[in-house]
Image (tube, rainbow, N blue to C red):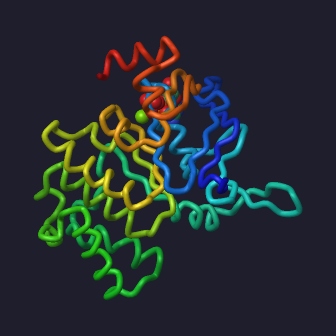
Amino acid sequence: MTAPLVQAVGVVKKFGDTTVLHEVSMDVQPGQVVCLLGPSGAGKSTFLRCVNHLETVDAGQIWVDGEPIGYRVRNGKLHELREREVARQRRGIGMVFQRFNLFPHRTALQNVIEGPVQVNRRGYGEAREKAMALLDRVGLADKAGSFPGQLSGGQQQRVAIARALAMEPKLMLFDEPTSALDPELVGEVLDVMVGLAGDGMTMIVVTHEIGFARQVADDVVFMVDGAVVETGPPSQVIDDPRHRRTRQFLAKVL
Ligand code: ADP
Ligand code: MG
């Protein structure tokens, strides 16, 4: 057994008096894809945001590649990290949102180059070459000079994926990456994600695309009301769910 790349242990998250994550635990092995399913309000986005420390947890801990997120271990104790160190941890985790969040006044290529040059202090030539290769990988080499407003939603989302990959993350988080897209544009984004999974990227994907989950997920985690209801391979959770809540949810989205 290898160590999990992501290990969430008893994660509790509250907003004020409301608990939105109730001791959520999950493991993601290196190279695995975990799809997070569940109705709106289940806590899926909040969980992803905890993984890359956009939210702090109230109890429990998330480990990524052996490091506790937001902390370091010294003499067997957890010590809170400074912002700089949190930023370092976060750089290893790529995130793609429902809304593409590209810089509108920069070309596709400039969007992809920005992080490596500004944050990772890569030389421009090297960053440019790599960005072109990434745009090619998402099928957009010919759109390098286009501005986001000149691209379709599916193309913008593929640029957003290339931009996240440019930081060489060890983990990719996707939060409903195709939910804002017109139906005919969903496939091109899912195809890129299928390719990434095939290349061995470790991914946590919040999605309602059951076909994608069935095809690509090693594990499916089904959440309701801030708690994990069931976890298992798609052949179990999607095709032979044990829990009534899972069956009800699937009946709605399938
Ligand atoms: P999902 O992504 O599964 O739809 P979310 O993680 O967005 O669910 O939300 C889970 C719950 O947490 C919801 O009840 C939501 O209203 C609440 N919530 C999310 N973010 C905040 C916030 N910043 N402040 C207060 N409540 C929040
Ligand atoms: Mg959400």
At 64% from the left edge and 27% from the top edge, which residue is drawn? 22
Res. 47 image quadrant: top right
Q: Is residue 87 left or right of residue 34?
A: right
- Looking at the figure, which quarter contains the C terminus? top left
Q: Is residue 180 left or right of residue 165?
A: left
Judging depth in this view, the residue of 19 and 93 nearest the camera is 93
At 42% from the left edge and 38% from the top edge, which residue is drawn? 206
Which residue in the rendered view is the most extreme toward the right?
75
**Residue 6 spot, x, y in % from top left:** 60, 50
Res. 140 image quadrant: bottom left
**Residue 216 spot, x, y in % from top left:** 38, 44
Judging depth in this view, the residue of 174 and 102 nearest the camera is 174
Identify whether 12 is placed above or below 157. Answer: above
**Residue 20 spot, x, y in % from top left:** 58, 27
Q: Is residue 114 left or right of residue 21?
A: left
The count of marks equals 0
At 49% from the left edge and 38% from the top edge, which residue is drawn? 219
**Residue 138 spot, x, y in % from top left:** 24, 62
Q: Is residue 160 left or right of residue 181?
A: right
At 51% from the left edge and 62% from the top edge, which residue is drawn? 170
